[in-house]
Amino acid sequence: MLDMGKKILKAEKRLDTAIQHIKLGRVKKRGFSGFSKCLGRLQGIFWQKESTSVGLVVGSMEDKIAKSVRVNQDCTSCEVCVKVCPVNNLKLENKIIGHHNDCIGCYRCVNKCSERAISVMLNRAPKWQYKCMKNVAK
């Protein structure tokens, strides 16, 4: 096992080499091997169905997630989920939390809901939430 001083010297040497390569215009790109490209395409087929720049492809995983938010009758309309939603998908309308089919699947609303009244991609209440997110002010 190398001691810490040798590891630091080795890292500094690699950093100096990388800086010299950048100055000379030789930038190495990592993660662009044939295997990485193939793996990325396979994952894209599952997730996106096909690449598009004009919105979601019908039937893609992103499209399913966007439309899959469920708020059950246990909701107390506390609006914690509305406040944590990064894309403003959730809104309080007539004392009921509604969604606008823009969900990105971050699960912040699911983890912040103290009543476990929100689910994404499931038609049932979540069995567990992240402990750090549990019982946040109503």
Image (tube, rainbow, N blue to C red):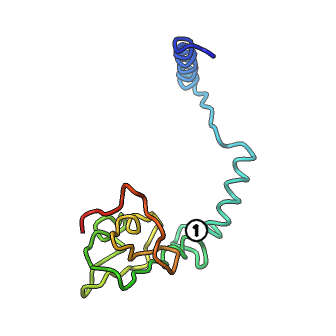
Which x, y percent locates residue 97? 32, 81
According to the image, label 1 marks what residue? 52
**Which x, y percent locates residue 128?**
46, 65
As rendered, which of 31 and 68 lies closer to the eye? 68
**Residue 51 position in % (x across, y down):** 61, 66
Tell me how many marks there are.
1
**Which quadrant of the view contains residue 17?**
top right
Give how far across and how far down residue 16 sits, in percent.
Answer: 53, 17
Which residue is rendered at x = 25% and y = 74% of the image? Answer: 78
Residue at x-position 71% and y-position 60%: 42
Up-down relation of residue 93 to residue 32 (above or below): below
- Say which amino acid is labelled 1: Thr
The residue at the point 62 percent across, 37 percent down is 29
Q: Is residue 87 left or right of residue 121?
A: left
Relative horizontal placement of residue 34, taking residue 67 as reference (left or right): right
In-front residue for pair 53/98? 98
